[in-house]
Amino acid sequence: MVKHWRPAVAALATIALVGACSSDPEPTEEQAVQPATTSCASSGELTMWERSGGNKQMVDLLVEAWNTKNPDCKVALTYIPHTEMVGKIAQGIASGEVPDLMGMDLIYAPQFEKAQQLVDLTERIKSWPELATASKGHMTVATYEDKLYGVPLYADVSALFYNKDLFTKAGLDPEKPPTSLDELRSYADKITALGGDVKGYYLPGNCAGCNIFTVGPLMWASGAKIEATAEGDEPLTGDGVKQVLQFARDMVKAGNVHEGDRAENGETFHLQFGTGKVGMMGTGNFNITLARQQNPNMKFGIGLLPGVSPNSSASFIGGDLVVVPRGSERVADAVNFMKFLLSDEVQVEVYAKALNLTTRTDMVDNKYFQAEPLVQDVAKALDVGRTPYTLTFFEQINSPQGPWLQMLQKAYYTDESLDTIIADAKKAMKTVASQG
Amino acid sequence: MRRGRRNGWVGLAYLSPALLFVLIFTVYPLVRMAWMSLHNWSLLTPPRWVGFDNYTRAFDDRQFWVSFGFTLKYTLIITPILIIGGYLLALLTAHNSPVRRLTRTVVFTPVVIGLGVSSLLWYWLFSTDFGFVNTVLLDLGVLKEPVVWLGVDADRSNLAIIASVVWKVIGFGMVLFVGAIQAIPSDVNEASLVDGASYRQRVTRIVLPLTLRTVLLVTLLSVIGSLLAFDQFYIMTAGQPQNETATSVFFVYLNSFPYLKLGYGAALSMVLALTILAFTVVQLLLTRRSHT
């Protein structure tokens, strides 16, 4: 009986293997030479994945604009929890269950490009004039060994948001945000002294990504380097690491942050500034619109995230790329969607109109930004911003269980020696980088 | 002879659906996991043979043992609560009456809710600013300011999670205990009453010995379930603070999926599976000894 089963089992196994191998068609040459347009080349729903916890408002608007223009080729958008995005994409690629295109947190792009899990778009997009002014940070990580794998979906830059109403109440000049860590501390003390439920500063105690976005720049501005770029590279170098950790520990001890901040895991990070109970907070450009919606009467300003020395500053240029996973069957349409995103009309009438940063620097001078000084202020962060480049960003930095957050939590909430804390984190990051 | 062989084929035919099920859903995944544990595999790149490196690494991985220690601690705390609590509830509700039936139903209801859903519910109940727990304790004057229950202090987080799991699971043991208690022949109880045994004597000398096998079964299930705890910690603390509430399975998940180290995750799973197997064997041996 077992013998009789063998052919059937073998046949089933063969079918499974053939199925697994054939689910990944590469674009044909005909598709490759099609010039891109801002409209869909074929009909039928385009599937797209995007992480939650990113700039959902912006992505929804972009998809809505595309769907209005292309009613026969609408993008069906699925949000994946941001902490599971990497695993979900990897599983999707391995099983052949991939969307036609996807938004990807730009810091993960190098890992997928190196593993050749994204479609090489060089021949399709390299001649686009829009790329010359596309966000440099995005295009750096969208490029691997001179091949192009994506274009910017949206850009987030971090800056220091401050509540002008609380500044005035605390006797501070509402037109002068702090320009050094010492000033930041002294301003926070004065705002906290107002009492009630008001605190001078905000530290997201349980969110690795929020901290690299807002505390990382404090270290960069103080001359430090954070991540290990590759095996053998030394992470957490420079005095700025310890200086910023000491600054944050002192802020917590002085009572300049809310007790509840300690549990912030990123879910409500974007809603904190708009409560009006925080004097100063490192956050992103996306908070301009959000804070206005939450608290229309609150007056606020935007400065740069400072370092130890006066007038030093830095910013994290983050955001998402649009990429095409290997196995996508609608590469040409995905490329058209990219062309659409970079078009003048979308840059102004979708990105700028929603007061989000344009992903092309030559589109910053537009009627919407001219009418909104806050966006112009936050755009200054682009000049001092940077995007980390490492193949193990998630494990070193962004993981809620990774060494970066562990180091910060110990520094913020314990009395352990900062040298020991930094040494432990350094060792863990080097181990991760060596295994990458 | 021919008839015996034919009977053998018929027997195999009857068994084949079950055998096939076990082969596909138990044996194959186990073999596949063992194979994976001997490779480095990120899903993004092809598997690479590394022999027993993943196992060597697992034994040197401090976080794995921290997670394992925490899982044991969680198991040691929650198991007696579930067993003793479930048994006491069963003693209170074993005899049928409308109020007791209603009590059993109420206590058992959370068992039919998914653990993920109940964890989300309790995550909200324990919320620092909006949670029902803090609101009640503040209103009653027990607390002067809101407590951060989850993700800040490992012991406090553990206790909060244990409270949520006890609410969710205790009804399961209770129902099994009620069944076992109700299965005790009534003449045994009646004889003890005639002999003048007190309630305590009847519970300790008659009910408990006669339901011991069920107690051991529920203990076994509770220990295995607790050693494999994942959902509640993933949802309610995500391992925080500083991975102190990351259970063993959470650590396996973390390595296998977010970190894309499938081979290492498989090796950790093998170590964990063997450990749980050892626990189970010891417990079964104890069960057998107590029975004999």
Image: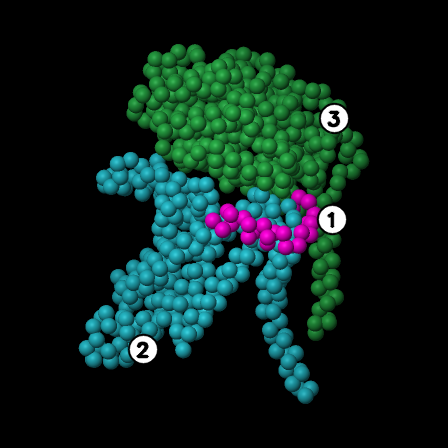
Residue furthest to the right? A29
Residue at image mark 2: B185
Locate the C terminus of chain B and report the quarter of the image it occupies.
Answer: bottom left
Asked if the residues shown at circle 1 and circle 2 are in contact, with their CB atoms under 8 angstroms apart, the answer is no
Give neighbour class at mark 2: few <14, some 14-19, many 20+ (Cα, 10 Å): few
Instruction: Tell me what residue is drawn at x 44 percent, y 62 percent.
Output: B221
Residue at image mark 1: A22
Instruction: Tell me what residue is drawn at x 65 percent, y 49 percent.
Output: B40
Task: Identify which amino acid the numbered label 2 is placed on.
Answer: Pro
Tell me if residue A102 comes above or below residue A362 in the rendering: below
Instruction: Tell me what residue is drawn at x 43 percent, y 74 percent.
Output: B288
Q: Does the magenta stretch include residue B60?
A: yes
Residue at image mark 3: A126
- Whether labels 1 and 2 belong to a single chain: the reply is no
Q: Which numbered dot is residue A135? A: none
Give the colour scheme shown: by chain
Q: Could you tell me which chain the residue with mark 2 belongs to?
A: B
Q: Where is residue B166 in the image (x, y as percent from the top left)?
A: 36, 54
Colour used to depict chain B in the structure image: cyan
Side of A23 where A77 appears, left or right: left
